[in-house]
Amino acid sequence: MAFIDFDNINISARKKGLKEIDFNKLREILLNGYNCVGCSVYLPDKLKSLIPHIQKSGLSVSIVSPNKSVDGRLIFDLLVNAYRNTFDVAIIASGDRDYIPVIEHRKSQGKKVKIASFESALSHGVRFVADEVLLLDDRLTDLSRFKRVYFCPECGKEFTDSHKYFNGYTPKCPDCYSKTKSKDM
Ligand SMILES: [Zn+2]
């Protein structure tokens, strides 16, 4: 079961230049290989305009009112579902240290907890206690809702990139780019 602390993910994503997250892709990345029994996005009240977009991607949304804490709500849901034994592996998309006690609790019951976070938002404690850490930094292009289509100047292949380059500069496709890099070494 996946629990997404949206603010935590979004703040780091924006710092990395990612303006809008593709929630379908995010779910796919988080659940990679796991059977999905539920995927919830926890949103602070101020971001409720995102609800239709998130629901269209097939995820459920929990809105947290302005004076309540998002992590408190997420932890409550996680524990209620754990008590009902509805899931096995907990996937938490956040690197916030507030989740350390709940991660430790799950682990003390012999259950697995996977964390997905951007490196800048990943606290040392979380990195230490989680069974598995997925760094979202490596998946930045996949996570972008808006992808630009380029044609590689070297091999002519079409590819997508979320990055906007300077006028007149055409990037090489990832294959040609890595070839150039390995030649340099
Ligand atoms: Zn190429």
Image (cartoon, rainbow, N blue to C red):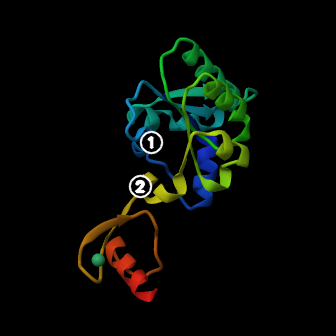
In the image, residue 56 above or below residue 79:
below
Q: Amino acid at mark 2?
A: Asp
How many residues crowd mark 2 within 10 Å: few (<14), some (14–19), many (20+)? some
The answer to whether residue 171 is visible is: no
Q: Are marks 1 and 2 in contact (CB under 8 Å)?
A: no
Residue at x 76% of width, y 27% of height: 67
Q: Which mark is residue 81?
A: none
Distance from disc 1 to disc 2, alpha carbons, whole Å, reads: 10 Å
Residue at x 48% of width, y 17% of height: 86
In the image, residue 137 above or below residue 58:
below
Give the mark nearest the N terminus, 1 or 2: 1
Residue identifier under label 1? 23
Query: Picture quarter containing residue 65?
Result: top right
Residue 84 percent location from the top left of the image: 53, 11
The answer to whether residue 6 is visible is: yes
Residue 52 percent location from the top left of the image: 45, 33
Q: On the rendered structure, is 40 left or right of 47?
A: left
Q: Which mark is residue 142?
A: 2
Q: The residue tagged with tag 1: helix, strand or loop?
A: helix
Residue 49 percent location from the top left of the image: 54, 37
